[in-house]
Amino acid sequence: MKTELPAIQVDILLVGAGPAGLAAAIAAKKAGVDSLIVLEREDNAGGILRQCIHNGFGLHRFKEELTGPEYAQRDIDTANEMEIDVRTGVTVLSVTKDKVVTAISKKYGLQIFQAKAVVLAMGCRERPRGALAIPGTRCAGIYSAGTAQKFVNLEGYMPGRTCVILGSGDIGLIMARRMTLQGAKVLACVELMPFSSGLNRNIVQCLHDYNIPLYLSHTVTDIRGKERVTGVTVSQVDENRRPIPGTEIEFECDTLLLSVGLIPENELTIGAGVEMSPATSGAVVDDHLQTNIPGIFACGNVLHVHDLVDFVSNESFKAGQAAADFVQGKQANGRVIPVKDGAGVRGAVPQQIRLEKGAEHENVDVMFRPDRVYQNPYVVVKADGKPIFSQKKMIMAPGEMANITLNAKQLAACEDAETIEVSISMEKPVLA
Amino acid sequence: MKGMGIMYDAIIIGAGVVGCAVAQQMAKYGGKLLVVDRMEDVADGASKANSGIVHAGFDAHPGTEKARLNVKGSKMYGALARELGVPYGQPGALVLGFSEEDRETLKKLLAQAEANEVEGCRIVERDEILAMEPNTNPEVVCALYAPTSGLVSPYEMTCALADSAAENGAEFSLANPVLEIKPTADGNWLVITERDEYKARAIVNCAGIGSGVLHNMISTRKVKMIARRGEYYLLDHMADIPFTMTMFQCPTKMGKGVLVSPTTHGNILLGPTADDIDNGYDVATTRKGLDTVMDKVRLTWPKVNLRQVITTFSGIRAHEENGDFIIGKVEGAPAGAYEAVGVESPGLSAAPAIGQELGDEVAAFLGLEKKADWKKPTPLPRSFRNMTDAEREEAYKKDPEYGVLVCRCEQVTEAEIRAAIRRPVGARSIDGVKRRTRAGMGRCQGGFCSPRVMEILCEELGVSPLEITKCGGESKLLVGTLHQIAKEARPDEN
């Protein structure tokens, strides 16, 4: 039984009013699109920044240190000034390849939108304990770091008194400091890999400054407690990430916080039939952030998990501009050339670059993560195997997203290529 | 001792699927009923952590209570699940054989199926198996096909049975462990619990893993319960479900295999192990157990992907030494004592039959007549997730809280969460809401929705967030306000 609801016509519909959705909306409006609607499932715009009350946001974009809510507020204020239609408390239920968007809310009920372009900006979610299959009991006191952050920063409640943190992702590190400042004891931060997945500045400012030990190459191998956590066992792991018997360390704690990875939230994307990348768990996009479905764009953490919101905003401005170009009939032409992950590279975005032969090429940023820590490596881009770009880096680590920019000349050298490959090399390549 | 003055017709000990099925049946008669359980919610033992299979009945030895009640129970499921509005399906099952030796075992199972009067079973060959279930290990040789094998959501079933019993007057006293049962001088029964004492003309022991201790308190014929723990993996629902049927493995000298099965909600369940343990309430998972499941699953499904795992859990089966169900009047005990002891697999399948037979038997002992004004169960409404757009519009018009999505992963609305708390035997904890609505059952495992579910529980129950538990008792989610904890840490500061 189909609904009889008339579809609401809109040029650009944006899903999510976090930093990505807001930036894309602002860029699209600036580019001259007036008919746009941003749908946000929470009761407030701002996304996850609302609960990130620590500072350190905006250094790249605003050249100053802001808290998460302050950073978000700037975009919210801009959107308000530009009279952008941001609707909160609205959950998008589905997006189709024809850009029909179904949403529901307490205020408007069920609504169907027919958009000319859709920008997907749903953000990401945390990996839960269950996904790691950590053995032990399933009692209270096990939270993802972000859930704990919500309890503390938005609700004003403490989820525990004594905690161990599994995973050294940025939210986990931030919560180690936050819980300590609030009177809890953080006994350890435990990381499976031989390196942290968080930003170096957070390791220093959130662990070292508070004497919280970081156990690299360790993991939680048992959780005890009948009703509430009473302790966890931590074991060292070998090079294959298997626990080494005899290395167990017992911690008595009432809480285990997990910061074990973020996963782009792509249910709507998959539902629309958008081609996905196994490397990023996000959509496959071209250099205009357009997916394989013309007129559907993706940006921010739903596309690939960023470290810094500044880069989310930057990427999303481009997506908003591209969506505006699309509805105004100004979309890019040219041939699509796939961008492949070469040695040492994981999840290069965009996965495709569209190049029109002989045209004036705009710079293209390519972002990716190295597969491990590298000292003094070169990032190399090859067109059909011929190096056309190389850049020396001091240090590269999986915890910090790498970013390179291909200029007009370098892109011109790719015009006839079948593939472009990004790799990490310890040898300086000879450019073609 | 407020209960002392009250005389019940019957007290049912245990609010699992069997206890609730007995209670639902008995509530069709006019008696005064009490259901007591040690946990804070119904279905909080084996009934919440099992395979959710309604077995066709080829597995149990002909002539046993298990075989008889399994086949009878599984035939009752379709109608009962419809009446209660509980998710149920009958996709069929395959028991996979990988050698000619296995074929002999499967032939024995087929003969057993025929003896137990299970309909439609036959041996199928490799090509047919791969046509039915293309993700099966291509090394499969043959299989027993059982078209009547079914699936049910066991905790939703139990909750619905409890609601129906409660709507017809049965009282529930949860989080109230029974410490002792004994006959009284006047020919009745005394049930001593942690909170109270109750008298009844009859008692029905449906206490699962705890049923052996209770049995031995009152009977001269002792039983021996063995706690058999089974560990499971649960996978996310996927766009293309890899198996539509329940895939068993042929039992071999190497042991009983594990199953790969869809659930009624489109997830995939892998497991269980079978380890006898000392503490019958220890439902921890272990590295060894989980690794065993994964190793064995690969025989059925070589391409199983751990990235799809959303949770792991374990459950306890109440195995009686002699291996059969013990159902009916307690042998070697005074009159008025009834029991369902040793109800391990296929206990879920048999539960409707056990409930009906035992309920009728106890009612007959009590001399009760069927009530004329018995209220038929109110079928659970279709979940928002399974509604069409038009149904969603209708639901929203009746209750605008259908417009508020609380659980993103499973698309559960605020209206449904409030309704779960307001049910006759309503949710009182995060897990209680989860079992009734699926909020928190999805891939983020409550990461996003649990703070909001907590708030709704507070509003509905009129309590502080500091009182809200994951699953009753001391399983509180929060330890204090920011101010309280900071004050504890630094008592000298303001």
Image (cartoon, coloured by chain):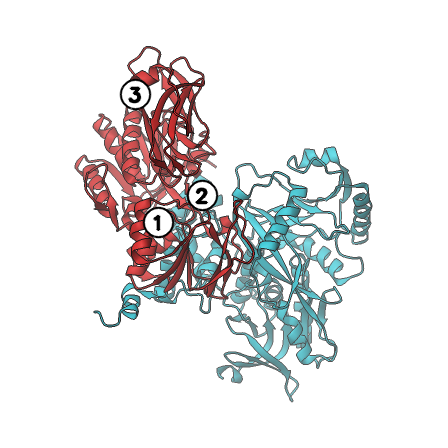
Q: Is residue A296 left or right of residue B208?
A: left
Q: Secondary structure at mark 1?
A: helix
Q: Which residue is mark 3?
A: A407
Chain letter, red in picture? A
- Please, which chain is the residue tagged with disc 1 on? A
Q: Please, is residue B213 above or below residue B379 in the view?
A: below
Mark 1 or mark 2, which is nearer to you? Answer: 1
From this viewpoint, which residue is outermost toward the left? A81
- Please, which chain is the residue tagged with disc 2 on? B
Name the amino acid, label 3.
Answer: Asn
Q: Toward the viewer: A370 or B450?
A: A370
Whole-angstrom CA distance, mark 1 to mark 2, is: 40 Å
From this viewpoint, which residue is outermost toward the top? A358
Q: Which residue is mark 2?
A: B391
Q: Secondary structure at mark 3?
A: loop
Q: Is residue A107 left or right of residue B99?
A: left
Whole-angstrom CA distance, mark 2 to mark 3, is: 53 Å
Q: Percent position (x, y) of residue A428?
A: 38, 25
Name the amino acid, label 2.
Answer: Glu
Q: Are labels 1 and 2 on one chain?
A: no
**Could one spot residue A38 in this view of the protein?**
no
Q: Toward the viewer: A212 or B299?
A: A212
Whole-angstrom CA distance, mark 3 to mark 1, is: 34 Å
- Please, which chain is the residue tagged with disc 3 on? A
Mark 3 or mark 1, which is nearer to you? Answer: 3
Q: Secondary structure at mark 2?
A: helix
